Image (cartoon, rainbow, N blue to C red):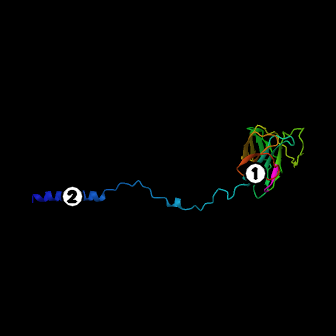
Amino acid sequence: MKWIPFLFALACSGAKTDDAEVDEPTEPTTEEPANEAADEPSNEASDEPDNEPADGMVFINEVLAKSDVTADWIELYNGGDTAIDLSGYALYDGDAADEAWVIPDATEIAAGGFLIVWADDMDEDSLGDTQGDVTSSLHASFKLSKDGEMLTLLDASGATVDSVEFPALADEESYARTEDGGLDWSVVDIATPGASNN
């Protein structure tokens, strides 16, 4: 009889040990479930435009900074498929952004077309709208340096559309894209104002 309490206590002690092992909580996992939804395509509309804006198709295409026949000039080229209204666009040389010359309202450049701007500082002694074989009524408020400088075209919002740093140029030499709207430039002996460089 005296062993019964001892066996009873021993049995109870073992039961507690077994319960503790069964009921002991497992360590929480630190791994997060993979977010499968992140890999699925979104049905929301994109904010990105489907096509490049037309403004990106206007280029500074050719520059002449010294001539005995005409004033300095800048040729713009529209590489897009539609005409572009250049009202409010602006040009400036060097770093004089605050003195940019604004292209007059209702100035349009045709699709695939060229536009000449005389860089003659709108001088009273200017040679006029027709110079050599070229006619343009656009006269910028600055002249170009024959020693070379930066030339920048802005859109109506003030964002840079195109820019080029042209080198020193001799009389009648121009700095032109080798292909209209292309990436490469070269100094050429025979300028092509208002016509293709190709």
- Residue type at mark 2 is Gly
- Looking at the rendered structure, the secondary structure element under dot 2 is helix
The label shown at residue 14 is: 2
Quadrant in which the N terminus appears: bottom left
Say which quarter of the image contains residue 97. top right
Q: Which residue lies furthest to the left in this view?
A: 1
Main SS of the magenta part reads loop
Region in magenta = 111-115
- Residue type at mark 1 is Val
**Disc nearer the start of the sequence (2/1):** 2
Q: Which residue is drawn at 52% across and 59% down?
A: 38
Say which quarter of the image contains residue 128. top right
Mark 1 lies on residue? 58
122 is within the stretch colored magenta: no
> Which class describes the residues within 10 Å of circle 2: few (<14), some (14-19), or many (20+)?
few
Does 115 sit left or right of 186 as displayed? Answer: right
- Looking at the rendered structure, the secondary structure element under dot 1 is strand
Between the C-alphas of marks 2 and 1, the distance is: 88 Å
Picture coordinates of residue 191 (x, y %)?
A: 81, 47
Picture coordinates of residue 6 (x, y %)?
A: 14, 57
Q: Do the residues labelled 2 and 1 touch (CB within 8 Å)?
A: no
Picture coordinates of residue 144 (x, y %)?
A: 79, 39
Picture coordinates of residue 3 (x, y %)?
A: 11, 58
Does 9 sit left or right of 93 as displayed? Answer: left
